[in-house]
Image (tube, rainbow, N blue to C red):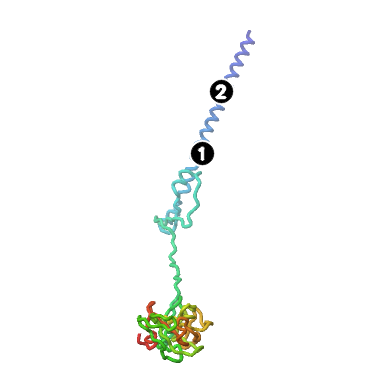
Amino acid sequence: MNGQRFSKDKARRNGFYLALAVCLVAVGIAAWSTYDAVHGYLAPVNEAVNQSSLSKEQEQEVLSGQGTVSVVPDRDREDPEAPRQSASPEPAKQTAGTVSRTESSEEPESSAAPEIEPEEGAESTVHVNAGVLYELSTELISPVESNEAAKAYSAGAPVYSETMKDWRIHTGLDLKAENEEAVAACGNGIVRSAYTDSLLGNVVWIEHGDYDFYYCGLGENFQVKEGDVVTKGQQIGVVTAVPMESAEGPHLHLEVKRDNVYLDPQTVLNGKE
């Protein structure tokens, strides 16, 4: 009987110690879990505080205007695991308490072409066709050897045409000339176009300053082309025939315009326009 009671007491004591050990283990596990959770929560906060803190030397540099401090967005401090956008190519900076953005102070270079000054003592010059210059002739010459008119400018009045057999306005000046006679430029200028017209034949259009000269009824082979700069007296073609005036013999048909308005070529050649 005594042996059985002793065995029961011993078993009861052993169960108590076992239960106590289990409780201590459970308490230890709970304490560790609580510590780990609190440490994990405080670590990002402490890191952010440490990163945003300035040393005394840095504070002095900022206050004196010699140091800089980067501005960290609030959203990065609140959530360190949040994805961050790439930095701007020109980040904002705070210098001595003032936020500023770096900007280039250099002004873009001007791409305008420099003006070309005329030579001293030269005749008046005029800019044409994107910077091409030519000397503006002060006097004009007759395009053919003879300055005799076969038919004058009609100034808006209709005249009878022997070729077309009708009455029509004569918008140019017909100068007598021999077949295949050389035709010269009346002054310095630039060729605006060389083309063929069904009524006027082969035409060379030359700009002489403010005036547009149309040399009509030239030979088949153009001796100048668009964009050529010509000088006074330079040959630009030869006399052949003007289709709408073929019955009137060989001559040069000359037309002159200013601001797209017909003028009397003889008056312009004489310098009276």
Question: Closer to the camera, 217 or 236?
Answer: 217
Mark 1 vs mark 2: in front: 1
**Location of residue 110 by image quarter:** bottom left
**Is 94 located above or below residue 255 in the figure?**
above
Question: Which structural element holds mark 2?
Answer: helix
Q: Answer with left or right where residue 11 lies relative to residue 60.
A: right
Q: Measured from the top left, where is residue 199 in percent x and y?
A: 46, 79
Specify the farthest residue to the right.
3
Question: Closer to the camera, 140 or 149?
Answer: 149
Residue 94 in view in this figure: yes
Q: Which residue is mark 1?
A: 40
Q: Measured from the top left, where is residue 197 in percent x and y?
A: 47, 78
Residue 117 in view in this figure: no
Q: Amino acid at mark 2?
A: Leu
Specify the farthest residue to the front.
165
Q: Measured from the top left, where is residue 117 in percent x and y?
A: 43, 81
Question: Closer to the camera, 38 or 74?
Answer: 74
Count of all numbered marks drawn on residues in the image: 2
Q: Quadrant of the N terminus?
A: top right
Q: Which residue is mark 2?
A: 20
Specify the farthest residue to the top.
1
Question: Which structural element holds mark 1?
Answer: helix
Give the CA distance from mark 1 to mark 2: 30 Å
Q: Measured from the top left, where is residue 59 in percent x and y?
A: 43, 53
First in sequence: mark 1 or mark 2?
Answer: 2
Q: Amino acid at mark 1?
A: Gly
